[in-house]
Amino acid sequence: MTLLTHILIAATYAVIAAFIAFVLPGVFDGFNEMTMVVLGGIVFFIGVQFHTLYIWKFGKEDTVNRLLALHQDYQVSIDKLEENKAELDELREKLYKVDNRQNAEIVTEMQVLQTLLGQVIEKSSHSPNLKNNKGELASGTPDVKKKVSHYDLKKKDRSESEVLNIMHHALEGNRVDLYLQPIVALPSRRVIHYEAYSRVRDDDDNVIFPSQYLKLAEDSGLVGTLDNLLLFRCIQVIRRLGPRRPDLRFFCNISSVSLNDKEFFPQFIDFMMENEELSDRLIFEFSQKDVLRQSPMVGRSLSTLGRRGFRFSVDQVMDLNMDLADLSSRYFRYAKVGAELILNRESDIHPDDIKEAFSRYDLDLIIEKIERDQTIIDILDYGVDYGQGYLFGEPRLSSDTQLDI
């Protein structure tokens, strides 16, 4: 009730009392003036009492209502507090599980990397060529202030033993880097995937290209270690990427040496099966030659990964007349074909039907080794959707800020 209302009520019984005390004696002669004044005072007093009683009753009701409202607000706050506490406990439990899972993943990866480096040391102990000319091992991480340069070792007439020595100490000194080359959508040239490559640096941080050491690495048994280090470098990038760009995938080449490594390949399969969340990110790539001569054991192991969601790609295609149905049944979803092979029309499949032939078996065709704009024009005539090559970008260090990841 407002102040104005109280004033009006007080004015009402005051007017009534004044009317009784001063007006009635003049209107009716039978009333005594003193008696009417007293009666008016009594009426005014009674009005004040009723007004006070009304104010007290109204104030009590208002207080009760306020207390009820506060009690309801308190109950709501208690309920919200309980909900927040439950959510906090749930988040804490999830965070604990995530931390434990990530720690377990890191431990597992470190165990695998330790196995790889152990293989390097073991292999080097049996190879007389892998000795440091300076009489000491290169260790530790490279100086980040050094500038990585691309240097052709052939200009210095390095011997095979020197190249192998550089590779050995690059593995021990953490100088094997991950490079990524984009795979783009055509004709927009939007980056949709990346292919992973490994690059080795010597003690002076000069990059040694695979063409200079790959054959020697295969002969010495180090290529399997390089492939597996490439894989785990790629996994580290995926971990950092997190949920961003969920459709972005990384093509990681697995050589025949790694496939036939009886010590590491089973461990690799077990690791992938324990990390099924990587199936949406990793595409394992094999050359056509290796695909055709895969042993039954390797085929069964890869099929196990395929049933867990992992997908594969065939590259270094030399002959387009391959069994596409067989590839599809073995969980291959990508095929990389050189631009020259398509343009030279060395296939029983008509060029205009190549994309449709691959699509019929859920195989995405990626044309690689595109280096000229004219090649794109010729390729687009066949309706190809994806391309890769130096025209779209050369392999860059995975930590390069220019990479779109």
Image: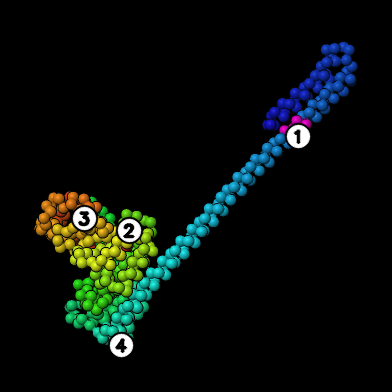
Camera-nearest label, 1 or 4: 4
User: Which quarter of the rendered picture does the N terminus lie within?
Assistant: top right
Of pointers 4 and 3, the one earlier in the residue sequence: 4
Residue at figure coordinates x 31%, y 56% from the top left: 248
Q: CA distance from mark 1 to mark 4?
A: 102 Å
Residue 56's disc number: 1
Examine the residues drawn in magenta and state their main secondary structure.
helix
Of pointers 1 and 3, the one earlier in the residue sequence: 1
Of residues 209 and 230, the one drawn nearer to the viewer in this rendering: 230
- Describe the element under mark 4 as helix, strand or loop: loop
Circle 3 sits on which residue? 325
Name the amino acid type tagged 2. Arg
Is 54 a magenta residue? Answer: yes
Q: CA distance from mark 4 to mark 3?
A: 55 Å
Q: CA distance from mark 3 to mark 2?
A: 17 Å
Name the amino acid type tagged 3. Ala
- Bounds of the magenta segment: 52-58
Name the amino acid type tagged 1. Trp
Residue at figure coordinates x 41%, y 68% from the top left: 106
